[in-house]
Amino acid sequence: MKKAVKTLLRKKKADLLLWVMTWLFAALTFAVLLFLIWHILVNGIVHISPSLFELKYTSQNASLFPALITTMLVVALSLLIAVPLGVFSAIYLVEYARRGSRFVKLVRMMNETLSGIPSIIYGIFGSIFFVVWLGWGKSLLAGSCTLAIMILPLIMRTTEESLKSVSDSYREGSFGLGAGRLRTVFKIVLPAAGPGILAGVILSVGRIVGETAALIYTLGNSPIMTDGLFSSGRTLSLHMYSLAGESLYTGQAYATAVILLFVVIGINTLSGLLAKRITRGT
Amino acid sequence: MIAKERVMRAIFIISALTAILAVGLICVFLFAGGLPGAGKIGIFDFLLGTEWKPGDSPPSFGILPMIIGSLYVTAGAILFGVPIGIFAAVFMAKVCPKPLYKVLKPALDLLAGIPSVVYGFFGMVIIVPLVRELFGGNGSSILTASILLGIMILPTVIGITESSLRAVPGELYEGAVALGASRERAVFGVIVPAAKSGIMAAVVLGVGRAIGETMAVKMVAGNQAVLRTPGEFLKGVRTLTANVVLEMGYAEGLHREALIATGVVLFIFILIINLLFSALKRREG
């Protein structure tokens, strides 16, 4: 402590100012985060009650149970569409295509474009294409397809990176033992790249759970349980958005926020653990 | 065996095409859905009109207030988020002790992962009343949206700035210190300027995040479709994104087309920002 004070006193004024600002602004950033989490938890946990988890939504209980189920359905469906597409296209780019070919560059550019598009644009597109043009209406299927396009670039990029990080000696060994390309990809490369791909998938789950703008006009916002691919519903985030708009349901909105926060914290912890495993593996 | 190889190879190629197909479909349907409407309204009346009254007869569809509104809140977000973000990134890259870093890095990821509705709600219950108490007005304003967006772009700005600061070779720092510069001077006088294009890329990506953010902004900005001057930062404003999300639910006919065209304008902004970002990234690499 004494030493710290001494070095502080020795600093010139401009240096001191920069030093103070560095610490101050960093502290401010994390203070905001802590305050947000603390505020949501303190106000939310008291409102978590059994009535929030009743099977049927009524305007009395504002149950989030149907939203919870719909969220899981949307996550599952979006992943079902986006994961094979994303993983397969990454396999093509890394394992099959000539490195640096024009096609690879084009796909990569389109991927970057997709990842920069804000979610409201996906929402508008989904509403024009899936909801109206294909005639699916505001539905589970339309919402999930919209989100599948949204998370595709994320899955593709993380898969590409983890495939690239698999050492070429694995592939050479497999080819040397007489395995074909396909066998090498599925038996050798993909298992080695598994944790990285999984981390990408988990991040996508986070994006789906947090999404509202892309879903409100594709999935719709019906508070009751969805029944089937072509019926509307709402995810937890949409549920919270609707509750936040009405002062009557502030308590329930806080409670939903708590659950969303827990989901995000859980997802981040999981992907962090996986990332650690990857760095240890190589 | 060979047949199976061929079939799977075809499947892989087709999958790789989906990204191209998706961008193509988005462009086609967005432009086809929005441009005819903008044409009917008149491109100039649409882009430069200051009245947005879809319910009047005849209705007026001018989105200039929303374009300006989006620019205000984005500029405000940059004003709050970028200085704080750069200093915090310097902290993360150069100052932070390692044990602390192990806690703070996941905290930043968490900040990035919090859903925008939760931010919006936080803005509604904390920042709106705070602005109302401190500066008057009803609290839902350009200032409020700017503060909230400033917080929301922090993880983006900090993350990219940090990695570009780390990419600066250590010799530069050592050289500066060897020449007698203090630690702060070496960081802010040598390393930060050396990471300039990376930091610019961070700012550009932050702009993209801020201009595209929808729900959080809609929840705190007040959403009046009125052309504001910069001096009216305590009054409400409507962004391009909020315009779509507010009215898309019930709009029909020309009104719906005008909303899709609003999306097209936003899309063009985003494409420009993306081009800028990849140009900056190329310069850094």
Image: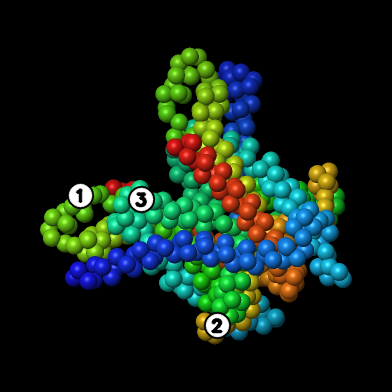
Question: Which residue type carries mark 1?
Answer: Ser
Q: Earlier in the sequence, mark 2 or mark 1?
A: 1
Question: Which residue type carries mark 3?
Answer: Ser
Question: Which residue type carries mark 2?
Answer: Phe
Determine the secondary structure under disc 2. loop
For residue A15, above or below residue A106 = above
Q: Mark 3 points at which residue?
A: A101
The label shown at residue B39 is: none
Nearer to us in this view, A2 or B60: B60
Q: Please identify, in this view, whether the residue under mark 2 or under mark 3 is nearer the observer.
A: 3
Image point 59% across, 47% down: which residue? B273
Co-location on one chain, circles 2 and 1: yes
Question: Can you name the residue that lies furthest to the left here?
Answer: A177
Q: How crowded is mark 2: few (under 14 residues within 10 Å), some or many (20 or more)?
A: some
Q: Residues within 10 Å of mark 1 (few under 14, many from 20)?
A: few
Q: Mark 1 points at which residue?
A: A169
Question: Is residue A93 rendered to the left or right of residue B66?
Answer: left
Q: Please identify, in this view, whether the residue under mark 1 or under mark 3 is nearer the observer.
A: 3
Q: Which chain carries label 1?
A: A
Q: Residues within 10 Å of mark 3 (few under 14, many from 20)?
A: few
Q: Name the residue under label 2.
A: A230
Where does residue B64 sit, x and y in percent of width and height?
Answer: 78, 54
Where does residue B147 sit, x and y in percent of width and height?
Answer: 70, 48
Q: Could you tell me if residue A148 is visible in this image?
A: yes
Question: Can you name the residue that lies furthest to the right here?
Answer: B57
Where does residue B271 sit, x and y in percent of width and height?
Answer: 58, 51
Mark 1 to mark 3 CA distance (whole Å): 23 Å
Q: Which of marks 2 and 3 is nearer the N terminus?
A: 3
Image point 26% across, 61% down: which residue? A185
Image point 52% across, 54% down: which residue? A113
Mark 2 to mark 1 CA distance (whole Å): 48 Å
Question: Is residue B34 rendered to the left or right of residue A180?
Answer: right
